[in-house]
Image (spheres, rainbow, N blue to C red):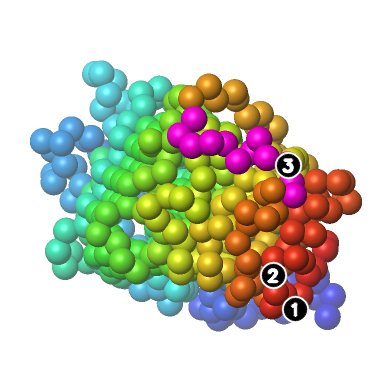
Amino acid sequence: MEEGKMDDLISSLPFEIQKRVASLLPLKEAVRTTSLSTFWRSLWSPIQLSLDFDPNPLNHEEAGQDIEQVMGMFLRSFACPEKLELNLKVPINNRNEELVVKATKGVKQELHVEFSETQNVPAKTCLCLHSTPTQRASFFGVKLLHLRSVTNLSKPLVSMMFSNCNVLESLSLEKCRGLESLEVETLSLQSLVVEDCSNMAAIMVSAPNLISFEYHGALLQIEIKKTVTLVDVVLDLRDGPGRNEFDCEDVLPILASFKDVEVLTISGWLLEWLCSAGVIFGKLEFNFNRLKELSCIDFVISKDKRDSLACFLNSCPSLVKLSVEIESKLNIIPCPCFHQYWHEPHLWMDFTTVRSNTSNLEQLESVNLVGFVGKEDELLLMDLFLEKATRLNSLILV
């Protein structure tokens, strides 16, 4: 059926049925329908309200009551997707700033919240999120919470929201460029994603049921506590080492905290820098004994990157699937010259020696190579896999 006729057909249905049609779509796809026609835009017209909000901690309870009541009404049912727009007047330095909160809820107990300020408040902030055992109704049913553009001005509201999310399973923070640190403490959380938070320097998580952790950005301090269920980790450090000086003493504890995961995605430059500083993975106090799937992402395969990956594979005895992805659009992150070495650097060896020092990959069955163009270092890496992976039954070159 033609798109225009389909729009006419849906627009002729009762409003509640129209909402039901929208609820059958994944939330992101449902929201995108606003660009299709006037009908879809009217279907997604947000509920608009204006409230006063005092970010002073002494006035949190009083300031938050109206917001909790509004959000409680908005989230009373997840039967259909809806949008809410709150214009909050926030007293700052004897004048009122405006904080706009755009909230979208989905039928799978999803809540996406984006913050924007009429006048940007430049102060950076640290965000502490602690859930508390309360049955207050405003956010109690939310299982997926996606926060975008959290700043110092919106921090009190976010903290109040999170404290009531006692069944929350998934938390995502995106483009929160005013945040310098994130501290999360909760029992129910299973998935945490932090993406494009350019000023973030530290993440501390205490979540005993956390299964998946995903981070995209620059290298930072990461501390995962009281977590024994972690399975899947993404360390996409495409923005390089950040503002801090690179130190193995700081980086290795991060890797050690992920030693029991089964699926790991990591940036190739990090392995190269560690090996260039003298780290030999096979001689560390920890191995990745449970690791089944490894993905390595980089902008190029060079001799040092190739040999660093070979060294890292010595710590992955149970590896079943390996992916090496070359993304030419990634930023070039040149390795510095390290003058003090922990061990005798294996990167000084020729490839014949590196290959002989690489453990047999006895469990490896599948290798995916993405973005390879047939350069010498890439071909030598392929030869390494073919020689060391005695059970290899699939090598895919894309």
Position of residue 109 measured from the top left corner of the image (x, y, whole percent): 40, 70
Most foreground residue, 96 or 116: 116
| Viewer-side residue, 145 vs 366 | 366
Q: For mark 1, does the 10 Å Cα neighbourhood hold few (<14), some (14 to 19), or many (20 or more) residues?
A: few
Tell me what residue is drawn at x 51 percent, y 45 percent.
Answer: 280
How far apart marks 2 and 3 lie (CA) works out to 21 Å
From the top left corner, tell me how far across and down residue 216 is, in percent.
53, 46
Mark 3 is surrounded, within 10 Å at the Cα level, by few (under 14), some (14 to 19) or many (20 or more) other residues, namely few
Residue type, label 2: Ala
Magenta stretch holds residue 11:
no
Q: What residue do we see at 68% from left, 40% from top?
A: 349
Query: Horizontally, is 137 left or right of 261 in the view?
Result: left
Q: Which dot marks residue 393?
A: 1
The residue that mark 2 highlights is: 389
Q: Are marks 2 and 3 in contact (CB under 8 Å)?
A: no
Q: Which residues are magenta?
A: 341-352
Q: Which residue is mark 3?
A: 350
Foreground mark, 3 or 1, reads 3
